[in-house]
Amino acid sequence: MQKKFSLPRGALVLASQSLTRRKMLADAGIHFIVRAAHVDEEGLRASATASLMPAADIAVLLAEMKARKVAHDNDDHPSGFVLGADQILVCDDQILGKPKTHEMAASHLQLLSGKTHQLLTAAVIYRDGERIWHHIEAPSLTMRPLTDEYIDHYLQAIGDAALATPGSYQIEGWGAHLFSSITGCSYAVLGLPILQVLAFLRGHGLALRGQE
């Protein structure tokens, strides 16, 4: 007999194609389906920043927009939970998104070098046409001083992976070499405050069940 975690009503839909988020949920034994969330993240972020919205609220907004988009575009699981997530990197009161070029990635790393920044990581649950839950974590990461030469070598080594995340690093890989200390939830650093997500799901019927 195999066992898995399951919900009594509907499915869990992950509104993200992030392999890291998918792995976290799968490793926790959660059954879910994946739906891509096609939203204009850059436009939403720019508009919210221009309106002086706090960075934490921007992270929640982006996570909600992803979940809402998937919920509206996919009616195959209308009663299910839709999970959206997003990260905002804040350093010296500046918000950094994913770099578009390697030159931009280098400038981001030069800004972060020798400083402590925050990763505001938001998760939102959307169901039956509305946001029913959200949570945000704000781990702090201190990057060791980096020379321009080291940054160039690092970016050459990781290639286009530098364009996949805010700050141009992936802490679970070679990005670990860039840091001297990290404070806060390690799961949130990876992109999803999974402990709080699991607590929410347990409160809504998630249980370990047997399956023939």
Image (cartoon, rainbow, N blue to C red):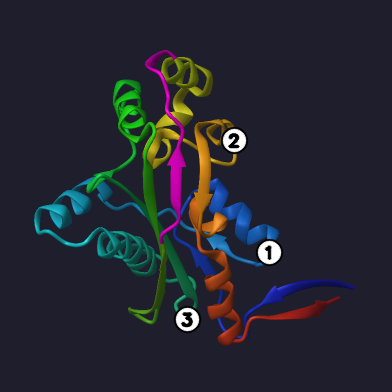
The three-letter code of the residue at mark 3 reads Ser
Residue placed at 47% from the left, 57% from the top? 35
Q: In this rendering, would 48 be left or right of 172?
A: left
User: How many residues crowd mark 2 within 10 Å: few (<14), some (14–19), many (20+)?
Assistant: few
Disc 1 target residue: 28
Q: Position of residue 122 (x, y in %)?
A: 39, 63
Instruction: Give the residues drawn in magenta, as a range.
Output: 138-149
Q: Which residue is mark 2?
A: 173
Which residue in the rendered view is the most extreme toward the right? 1
Q: Nearer the viewer, residue 190 or 138?
A: 138
Q: Disc number at residue 209?
A: none
Mark 3 lies on residue: 79
Quadrant the C terminus occupies: bottom right
The quadrant of the image that shows the N terminus is: bottom right
The amino acid at mark 1 is Ala
Residue at 45% over, 56% down: 139
Q: Is residue 80 above or below residue 185?
A: below
Badge 3 element: loop
Q: Earlier in the sequence, mark 2 or mark 1?
A: 1
Which residue is more in the foreground, 130 or 28?
A: 28
**Mark 2 vs mark 3: which is more N-terminal?**
3
